[in-house]
Image: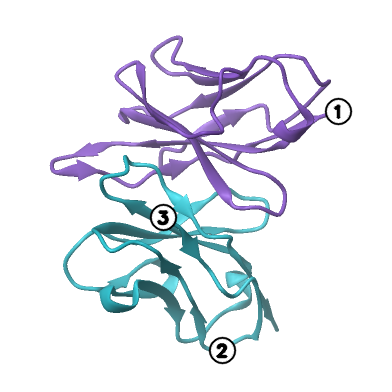
Amino acid sequence: AQSVSQHNHHVILSEAASLELGCNYSYGGTVNLFWYVQYPGQHLQLLLKYFSGDPLVKGIKGFEAEFIKSKFSFNLRKPSVQWSDTAEYFCAVIFTGGGNKLTFGTGTQLKVEL
Amino acid sequence: EPEVTQTPSHQVTQMGQEVILRCVPISNHLYFYWYRQILGQKVEFLVSFYNNEISEKSEIFDDQFSVERPDGSNFTLKIRSTKLEDSAMYFCASSAELAGGLDTQYFGPGTRLTVL
């Protein structure tokens, strides 16, 4: 079955540290890739997405992600995190040919300490 | 910026009772979705809806579940006879249609359903 994995479930960083959250999926076909964020008490918001073109995607709030097709990965990065980045981060994939449903990873809880 | 809204934010019900969860999608969107997240688990797809009919549903979406767009703005999820395992956060989402494919799905704040 097609699946999405996020290997880091809880991450704690100090402000200004660099962030990389892993996301892998199991599917050899075409995919649409997303990172969503859920700040405490708020709803899921889109951080960035990849449909086609340049595999390095820039999103809001200084986040970026790189699609590496050979590794089935779409890792999220930020060079310098802030306390306000404390949130839960979800990788999600649309596997083309499987309708338009999002398949989510388990999420990564990021805590940024001052 | 337009948002997806959901009501109620919390719903507590007794096992076996019917519940209706309501969503108002973004006004020019044509595709609507329900997802749920059981505490500690992944967000799971339930159903997608387009042109007044279900376009796709998951194994979770059995005969106890139904969806409806009763008017031009609301999109509802009904659970006919709730079970304890239906306790979860239910998210509504909507997306527009772009040439060549679909746009991003935008999510509402969720309804936390607790079945006692």
- Residue assigned mark 3: A2
Residue at left 26%, top 45%?
A97
Q: Which chain is cyan?
A: A
Please provide percent x and percent y for residue A104. 49, 54
Q: Amino acid at mark 3?
A: Gln
Quadrant assignment for the C terminus of chain B: top right
Disc 2 crowd rating (10 Å Cα; few below 14, some 14-19, many 20+) is some
How far apart, in angstroms, are the residues tagged by discs 3 and 2? 35 Å
Quadrant assignment for the N terminus of chain B: top left
Residue at left 74%, top 34%?
B85
Q: Which subunit holds the residue at mark 3?
A: A
* Numbered mark located on residue B88 in the image: none
Residue at left 31%, top 28%?
B30
Please provide percent x and percent y for residue B88. 69, 39
Residue nearest the observer in this picture, A32 or B59: B59
How far apart, in angstroms, are the residues tagged by discs 2 and 1? 45 Å
* Numbered mark located on residue B116 in the image: 1
Residue nearest the observer in this picture, A79 or B16: B16
* Numbered mark located on residue A16 in the image: 2
Mark nearer the viewer, 2 or 1: 1
Which colour is chain B painted? purple
Q: Amino acid at mark 1?
A: Leu
SS under mark 3: loop
SS under mark 1: loop
Q: Is residue A63 visible?
A: no
